[in-house]
Amino acid sequence: MKRFQPFPSDKPVRLGLIGCGGICRGVHVPAYRKDSRVEVVALCDIVPDRTARLVRDAFPAAQACTDYRELLARPDIDAVDICTPNHLHSEIAIAAFQAGKHVMCEKPDATDPVKAEAMKAAAEQAGKLLMVMRNNRFTDASKMARRFIEAGKMGEVYAARCGWQRRRGIPGRGGWFTTR
């Protein structure tokens, strides 16, 4: 897999957002609005009102669509940020690589290892970057575990299991978030 090389700093990364639900609106959009290195040029969601609100409230110069293939066909997009339901991640990411786009994808990257490997292969074949949002990788607890492992304090690690508890329980219990 190719190591990350920053985009040229003299121009912003032109980004398309695919999937404008809760994680997109609550986390990704606020971050992109603060980052001058990113220009959101298009938004896509199967619910037209979501994209219309984001264009109106956050990215007035962006275009909206309801089919991710339309967004991927745009030559003015360098990269896409995939924030769709989990079972759609691999299909959209592979199509994005075939369209010549870099991909950032919400976790999990795919719903099974075969699809994850297909995403990796598509990225390598296209010569594009794949970044899966693994935000817990950089938490204090994760960094401490890594230090213990590197210092040899845990012996040979061949498997690991980790859990986080959310104060508010499971979001969307019974909805798509917990059933797919």
Image (cartoon, helix red, strand yellow):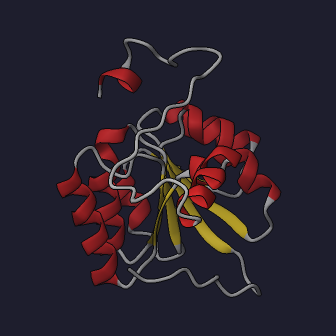
Q: Nearer the viewer, residue 171 or 12?
A: 171
Judged left or right of residue 27, residue 137 is left
Q: Residue at x 64, y 38 (%)?
A: 25
Quadrant placement of the N terminus: bottom left
Q: Residue at x 75, y 45 (%)?
A: 30
* Image mark count: 0
Judged left or right of residue 98, residue 150 is right
Q: Which residue is drawn at 27% across and 82% down?
A: 125
**Image x and y of residue 168, in percent:** 62, 14
**Image x and y of residue 65, in percent:** 47, 49
**Image x and y of residue 54, in percent:** 66, 41
> Looking at the image, which residue sits at the far left?
114
Decide if residue 60 is in sight here: no
Q: Which residue is drawn at 64% across and 82% down?
A: 6
**Image x and y of residue 42, in percent:** 56, 57
Q: Which of 66 and 94 is in front in this view?
A: 94
Task: Decide: is 10 above or below 42.
Answer: below
Task: Decide: is 39 above or below 157.
Answer: below
Q: Nearer the viewer, residue 169 or 38?
A: 169
Q: In which quarter of the image is residue 66?
A: top left
Quadrant placement of the C terminus: top left
Decide if residue 171 is in sight here: yes
